[in-house]
Structures are given as structure tokens and as C-alpha cells.
Amino acid sequence: MSVHPFPSVEHVDVLIIGAGLSGIGLAYYLQRDQPGKTFALLESRATSGGTWDLFRYPGIRSDSDLHTFGYEFKPWVNDKSIADGADILAYLRETARENGIESKIRYQHKVVRADWSTPEARWTVEIERTDTGARHTMTCKWLFSCAGYYRYDEGFTPRFEGIERFAGQVIHPQHWPENLDYRGKRVVVIGSGATAVTLIPAMAKEAGHVTMLQRTPTYVMSLPSKDPIALLLRKLFSEERAYALTRRKNIALQRGIWRFCQKYPRAARRIIRFANARALPAGYPVDTHFNPPYNPWEQRLCAVPDGDLFKTIKQGKASVVTDHIDTFTEGGIQLKSGQHLQADIIVTATGLNLQLFGGIALAVDGQDVDLSTKVAFKGMMLSDLPNFGLIVGYTNSSWTLKVGLLSEHFCRVLAHMDRHGYAVCRPTLPTPDMATRPLLDFGAGYVQRAMKWLPRQGTTGPWVMAMDVQHDAEVLRQGPVEDPCLRFERAATTPAQAPAMKAAANA
């Protein structure tokens, strides 16, 4: 009679890090396509939802339509296509409840470290309880990170000269105070990205005046908050059929816009500028505040539902200033142009700090892993990291489109391993000196700041971090699992033999 080598350690086939959009999605596909596999989700926070539970600032919403940002398997039935954060969070939690995923989530379980053992063909994962500080371990055949790519405990705020002199409140959107009273107050929002363009129209409803202070303009496009075609299709077809048709239409539209911007950047710039000029007051300095020095989609375009940002500016409730900060003062911000912005509240919508895998330390056979030396394989694994998966969504389209494709492909990898009796799956570079480039071809500041710590991507084939949903559908959904650069191996030992072999090796 054999004795289990880990009598007090729980073991699962797949251990998922994160119970947000990606983690819940992956769990669904595992249940559907690999019902025999055991899995658990470890969530460091006390609640599910990831980004959509973390951010609580006014007006938080998606910047992608929910017919593509929602899951393929669960129709989005809200009339709003560009949805509020609360509605998205409710949708995610409903998905988890309906599919029995909620019971698989271990809350306040933070992964601290994960060690891969080749003799045992498994990961040993060290976990800290964030409520008690207690630590314990789990083991798994596969470790899959659905923790996103930014730090949850702190956002990015650059060093501002004189910030300690400011007499009012300074707030980062990632840590929004509950019940903040900004009624009638002067608010300056530093930044011009998706968070800033969301905050400004939301706060302007009650604030005395809101100013968006930016160093460089961002491309901003108005989109209807409700999709009239989607609403029509819901009258003509079942919810499932209408959702599928709308999703297909919107995927094609997103892809078409992105490809047009890539191929005809000057024309795209003119079209966006024309639309902005029509939405803003006559004579407004569009080129100063809404005409960036880079081409469309070199950074993510910001979507504003029903042009709410432009309407707020037109109504005089908000304004845009494009300038550089000289110093904070007791009453606001002194700009290098000489202008002074009076403020009671300053919001630093200055971006995120990137952090892959929630900051966990990885090791393979006792050797710490340097992520900057790894290369992404099919956007799902990293070179020489066995049985380790990750999800990073699209930067030019809805994040969730990638979640579905990667989850399906992962389930196909598991099925292939079961059919052939494999225990280990490991991408390997074709040559040690293979040409690489940055993981994300994206000009956003938060990406550029973290580039030296991130893995890389290749220039061709399975080593490319594709940002084209059609390409990924062909590779991940229709293409083969096997690849010359993907090594499958049988276990060197049985689990019962592994501890004895490990002890002998260390003797």
C-alpha cells in the first residue's frame, strides 16, 4: 500500500492565481472542457472581481463594449454597451455563482512563492493568509497566473515638487477615499488617459469645476453608450443569438478600426480630429488639447460614451490645460507657463505600476527565475518555465477576447497531455540567441517604465505576443497544439518515488 507523499498538503491539477475577469473565465473553460481536472482559485483580496472591485473612483466604466468585454458563453443583457463598473462587477460575480466557480475561490490567499520540482513534476506553492498572516502550502501540476499586469497595492505617482505644501487633498484613483465630498470644489485631475477622461465628467456633475491637466494629449473618441444594432437584434432573436451576432459585429469593427489606424495613420488622425472639433465648442483649440504627437493606437485610444467629456467641456463645467508642472503650491499647481491652477482636490490619474503574476517569486529546481530573460510562447507560457501559464489580454481590443482563446487552447494542451501520458509541458527557444523585442509594443508610460523587468517576445511564429484576434483564433483555436518549440515529457518518477529520489540527490 503506497503512502501519499504530501499527507497534509492539498493538491490540485490546476491552481489559478486571481479571481478577476481572467481567473473566472479560465475556471469556466476548465469545467467545460476538462471536467475531470481539479482546480482552485487563489485570491489575495477578500472579494472577487479584480480590477472591477478594486477601483472605486467616480464614473468607473469599461472602455470596451460589453458584447466583446463580456464572456463569449454568457450574454451581456444590459442595455448599455459601455457599462458602469458596478454592472460589470455584478456580471462577473453572477458568472461565478451560476457556474459553481464561487465555491472554488479561496479568498485572502496570497501566493508568495512557487517552486517547480522536475523529479516531482509539480509546483509547490507557498501561500500567505492576508487576514491572519499564517502560511501554508499547496501543490499543483499546473500553475496559471490570472493576476493581470499591475500592482494592486499602489498606483504610479511621479515625484511632484512641493507636493507637501498643498493644503488640500491629493488622491490617486487606485485608492479612492470612501464618501469623498467634492461638491462645489475645484478639482484638478493630472493625466489624460482612460481614468482621467472617466473621472472628469463624473466629478463635474457635483464639483465646482474640474480641470484636466495633461503634459501630452490623448486620442479620445466618442462612442454610443447603447448599441442600437444590438438592441434591434435582441428584439429579433434569442438573447444568445443576438449576443453572438453583436459580438461578431463588434470584433470585426474593432479589428477594422485598429487595422485602418495602422495602415492609414494620417487619415485616422484627421477623422478623429474632425469628430473632436464637431463635439467641442466653436473655436476650441483642438490641436493643443486633443491632437497627440504620436499616431493613433501607438497608445490606447480613450472611449467616452455619448461624448460625455466633450459635453462637460462645452457646458463649461470642465476644462483642459496642456502644460508642465513647475511646483505644487499651498492653493494648487504652478505651471511652467506661468499659469496657476487653483485647487481644493488634486487627483493624480498618472497611471499604474506594472507587476506580473502579483509579484510572486518563481523558482525551478531551486534556481530563482529572472522573468526578464524569458520569452512569451503563444502569449500563454514562458520559455523554460514548465507547466506555467499566464493571461495578458489585448491592448488594442477587449481583454476578454484573449481570455477565451487562451483558456480554450490551454484545455487542448491538457487533453493532448492526457492522451499521450505527458506530465510536463515546456516551451524552449529554437536557439539561445533568438532575436527578441519588448513584450508589449505599446507606448504607454506604465509599460515603458517596467520594460526592463518584463519578459520579451520574439519576432516570428509562436513567440509573438499577437494583438490580432483573428490571428489568435487561427493559432489558438484552430491550429495544432504540438509545436517544434514545445517539449512534452513524461514524469521522471511517480509522486511516491519523488521524495526518496530528491533526498538521495541532496545527500
Image (cartoon, helix red, strand yellow):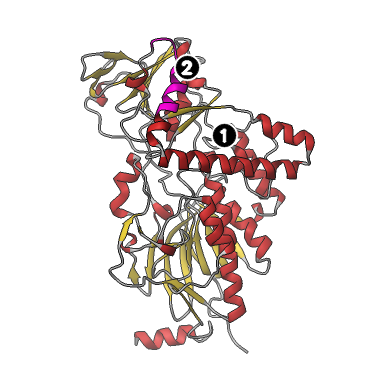
* Residue that mark 2 sits on: 278
Q: Give whichever of discs 1 and 2 has the lower sequence position.
A: 1
The relative height of residue 354 versus residue 500 in the rendered view (above or below) is above
Q: Residues within 10 Å of mark 2 (few under 14, many from 20)?
A: few
The relative height of residue 328 versus residue 43 in the rendered view (above or below) is above
Residue closest to the eye, 492 or 391: 391
Mark 1 lies on a secondary structure that is helix
The amino acid sitting under disc 2 is: Arg
Could you tell me residue 61's position as x and y percent? 54, 32
The N terminus: image quadrant:
bottom right
* Residue that mark 1 sits on: 85
Residue closest to the eye, 335 or 323: 323
| Mark 1 touches mark 2? (CB < 8 Å) | no
Could you tell me residue 148's position as x and y percent? 46, 49
Q: In the rendered structure, which segment of residues is drawn in magenta?
A: 270-283
Could you tell me residue 493's position as x and y percent? 50, 86
Mark 2 lies on a secondary structure that is helix
Q: Is residue 426 magenta?
A: no
Camera-near label (1 vs 2) is 2
The C terminus: image quadrant:
bottom left
- Mark 1 to mark 2 CA distance (whole Å): 29 Å
